[in-house]
């Protein structure tokens, strides 16, 4: 099974207070998917991540997709098929921008 | 995600000095201050910048290698957790210097080359032999393990030679060819009539560049100019930030520590030694204006304004006298 490798040239940071804002929104019943909490930046391309995206970015290094999904299922109360689809789509976007590769 | 606000600049372009061994006809900083911050002050400022959340610093000038303490300053920046890069004319980069730059923590170095033709480059840069030395620098840096790019300011001497520039960059093994749009700042403003293209020529250049990038040319062809939005390409930094990134994702610091939105906007918003960067980023009225531009002139009725936001704010200010003025490079009627 291929493992995910983050491009070491990608700059990233989690924005101060943004995760707390997203969690507070969740408590109010809002959609956290629309709240940016972190950003990736490399070669003039920037990607804004919501809370799930930030968690995927921070935990994907050296893992297979199966391992990544299994780990996230421990954190998120969501159907595995839905989560896998979200993760797969997000990883494809990261790979398309050169932010990750598989080895 | 429209309410999401970047809490600190991602990158800072930092002029360490304005001294230079070249005499380029488009230099934006030749008329700038000679005052330089000392190494101790710089290192303390770099640590504060990193602490504020900035991710990367790109050193420029002037020619940064004319600072005898460049390696120590770069090591300070890298030690503070910043990704460190630099723009250089390459003239002073031999093999030992390239290895020392790698050791100091430089991740990437861009070498300025204005033409694939040595005689054209040398005449433009005012130094015989500079093209040969720049090419040699690319090889030395690659051998030392430093990633390289070629930076080319598009102007009258090279706008019709994109294909040749790409071939030249591929021959020299660089990862990226950065084609910078011409800025009307410093000597670039003084020599604008001689060097700048007219709007139709800019449109033709960008159409060619977009076509080259779309068909795949074996190299990262980079060009960030907000006016290309009308050709169907959105901003390189992604849909979050439209128009100029100056003051939205990046800032510029001059050799005396003065902070400006970018290297081509001569409006000082503070000083990195005496002011708090995060506070300036949040409260500067100048940055506020850059982030909330209003259409003026022909932009009012233009269907592309929502994507380009009037184009380059530096050019608008230099030629139109206001950030909100239409970009003088814009070809839209």
Image: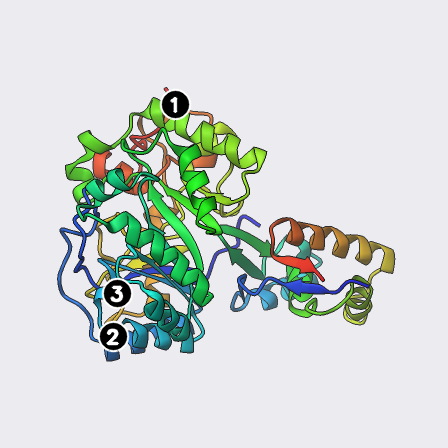
Query: What's the residue at 50%, 33% (across, down)?
Result: B210
Residue nearer the viewer, A7 or B305: A7
Q: Mark 3 falls within which chain? A: B
Horizontal and vertical percent position of residue B121: 26, 42
Horizontal and vertical percent position of residue B212: 51, 33
Q: Nearer the viewer, mark 1 or mark 3?
A: 3
Q: Secondary structure at mark 3?
A: helix
Q: CA distance from mark 1 to mark 2?
A: 47 Å
Query: Circle 2 sits on which residue?
Result: B69
Q: Nearer the viewer, mark 1 or mark 2?
A: 2
N-terminal of the pair, mark 1 or mark 3, is 3
Q: Which mark is residue B332?
A: 1
Horizontal and vertical percent position of residue B191: 16, 36
Q: Secondary structure at mark 2?
A: loop
Q: Is residue B237 left or right of residue B29?
A: right
On the same chain, marks 1 and 3? The answer is: yes
Query: Circle 3 sits on which residue?
Result: B65
Query: What's the residue at 66%, 50% (across, down)?
Result: A93
Q: Secondary structure at mark 1?
A: loop
On the same chain, marks 1 and 2? The answer is: yes
Quadrant position of residue B125:
top left
| Label 3 packing within 10 angstroms: few (<14), some (14-19), many (20+) | many
């Amino acid at each position: 099974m291929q493992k995910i490798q983050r491009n070491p040239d990608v700059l990233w940071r989690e924005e101060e207070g943004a995760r707390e804002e997203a969690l507070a929104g969740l408590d109010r019943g809002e959609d956290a998917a629309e709240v940016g909490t972190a950003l990736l930046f490399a070669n003039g391309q920037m990607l804004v991540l919501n809370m799930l995206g930030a968690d995927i970015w921070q935990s994907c290094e050296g893992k297979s997709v199966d391992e990544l999904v299994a780990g996230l299922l421990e954190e998120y109360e969501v159907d595995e098929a839905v989560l896998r689809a979200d993760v797969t789509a997000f990883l494809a976007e990261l790979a398309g921008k050169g932010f990750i590769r598989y080895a | 995600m429209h309410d999401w606000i970047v809490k600190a600049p991602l990158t800072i372009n930092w002029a360490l000095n304005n001294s230079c061994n070249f005499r380029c006809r488009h230099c934006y900083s030749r008329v700038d201050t000679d005052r330089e911050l000392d190494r101790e002050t710089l290192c303390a400022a770099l640590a504060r910048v990193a602490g504020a959340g900035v991710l990367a610093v790109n050193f420029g000038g002037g020619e940064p290698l004319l600072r005898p303490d460049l390696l120590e300053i770069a090591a300070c920046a890298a030690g503070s957790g910043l990704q460190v890069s630099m723009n250089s004319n390459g003239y002073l980069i031999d093999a030992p210097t390239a290895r020392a730059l790698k050791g100091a923590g430089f991740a990437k170095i861009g070498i300025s080359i204005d033409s694939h033709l040595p005689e054209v480059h040398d005449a433009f840069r005012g130094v015989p032999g500079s093209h040969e030395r720049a090419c040699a620098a690319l090889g030395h840096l690659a051998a030392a393990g430093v990633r390289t790019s070629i930076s080319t300011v598009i102007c009258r001497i090279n706008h019709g030679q994109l294909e040749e520039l790409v071939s030249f960059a591929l021959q020299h093994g660089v990862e990226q060819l950065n084609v910078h749009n011409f800025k009307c700042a410093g000597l670039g403003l003084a020599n604008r009539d001689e060097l700048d293209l007219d709007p139709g020529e800019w449109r033709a250049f960008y159409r060619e560049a977009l076509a080259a990038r779309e068909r795949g040319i074996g190299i990262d062809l980079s060009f960030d100019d907000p006016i290309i939005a009308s050709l169907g390409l959105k901003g390189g930094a992604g849909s979050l930030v439209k128009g100029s990134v100056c003051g939205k994702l990046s800032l510029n610091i001059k050799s005396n520590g003065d902070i400006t939105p970018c290297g081509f906007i001569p409006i000082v918003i503070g000083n990195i030694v005496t002011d708090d960067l995060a506070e300036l980023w949040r409260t500067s009225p100048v940055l506020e204006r850059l982030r909330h531009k209003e259409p003026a002139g022909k932009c009012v009725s233009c269907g592309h304004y929502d994507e380009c936001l009037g184009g380059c704010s530096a050019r608008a200010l230099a030629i139109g006298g206001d950030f909100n003025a239409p970009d003088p490079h814009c070809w839209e009627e």
